Structure formats: structure tokens, C-alpha cells
Image (spheres, rainbow, N blue to C red):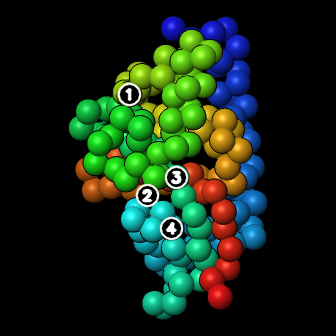
Amino acid sequence: MNPDWYAAWREEAFQRLQAKNARLQDEFRLGSWSRYDYDLKAGKLLFSEDGIVKVVTEIQIAGSTSAKASNWLWSWANSNLPGELLSDAKLVRSFGEENGIDELAQPYVMDTDNDLEALGWELAGAMVRICDALGAYHSPRGEGGGLYLILKSISWAS
């Protein structure tokens, strides 16, 4: 169950995320670098070209999608992830619990619309809105799912 206001709130969060990500594309060329690497120990996402890091971001982990399971798993429920990158996701869980929003408070969200990528972006958008993050990044995985990262800071590499 979700409160009546939640569907419109989530849609607005997704629209805000699209605007934030468009700004990051314009200012930092996110999505156009030839390579990216994430370092979960350091909590960073690095964008590079010709072996030279160009853009550095600090991240939190939102969650992951699985094509095999056809669902989303919140990062706070994934024991394989480093705890220091889960604090924002835990805020999302608390927000969900306080407001009776099941998909934010329960570990798994099923892909009922058969559009796993849209589900991932919409839930990442909810986290960006709740945590006032700069944007989000999707790292595709081989089996058809992906890891969704929330951008907390961004700068040009020095």
C-alpha cells in the first residue's frame, strides 16, 4: 500500500531527476565519457577518457535491478555492499516507513510494468529527491539488470 499522494510525488521526483541529470550532462558531459569506473571502497564514481580521469563524483548506492528476478533490491537490504555507502538509502527506508510507502520500506520492489530500467530510474529518483542529491547514474550489468548510484558531489579532476 502507498498513500494517495505518492504516485504523483514519485512522478515529480523522476521528472526532477531527469532535469538534474540533464544539467550534469551539460556541465560535466556525464554519459559521454569513454569509460567510467566505480570504487565502492572509496565511494567514488570516476569518468575518464584515454586513461585519464576527467570527472570525480562521490556516491551513495540506491539499489540494483535484476532481470532474472524481475525486481529492484534496495541497497540497504543488500549485505554485500559497504555500509558507508548506504546511509542515504536508509533515509529512504525511514521515509517509506514514516509515510506508509511500501516500495520504499520493503527490500524488494517487483517489476509489475515489465520495464525494469524505468523502475530503477523512478526509485533512484525518489532517493535523489528524499536525500537532495545532485543526480543518479545507472551502471548496466551483463544479465540485464543494473546498479543505480546517487551522486552526492561532482567535480572536474585536478
| Residue bearing the label numbered 4 | 45
Residue at 47% across / 72% down in the picture?
36
> The disc labelled 1 sits on which kind of residue?
Pro
- Callout 1 touching callout 4 (CB < 8 Å): no
Would residue 90 be found to the left or right of residue 110 on screen? right
Would residue 59 be found to the left or right of residue 112 on screen? right
| Residue bearing the label numbered 3 | 60
Indicate the secondary structure of the residue bearing disc 1: loop
C-alpha gap between disc 1 and disc 2: 20 Å
Q: Are there few (<14), some (14-19), or many (20+) residues within 10 Å of tag 1?
A: some
Mark toward the start of the polypeptide (1 vs 2): 1
- x then y, percent, for residue 13: 69, 35
Residue furthest toward the front?
A: 84
C-alpha gap between disc 1 and disc 4: 24 Å
> The disc labelled 3 sits on which kind of residue?
Gln
Indicate the secondary structure of the residue bearing disc 3: strand
Residue closest to the eye, 6 or 154:
154
- x then y, percent, for residue 86: 47, 45
Residue at 51% across / 35% down in the picture?
90
Mark toward the start of the polypeptide (1 vs 4): 4
> The disc labelled 2 sits on which kind of residue?
Ser
Mark number, residue 139: 2
| Residue bearing the label numbered 1 | 107
Mark toward the start of the polypeptide (3 vs 1): 3
Mark toward the start of the polypeptide (4 vs 3): 4
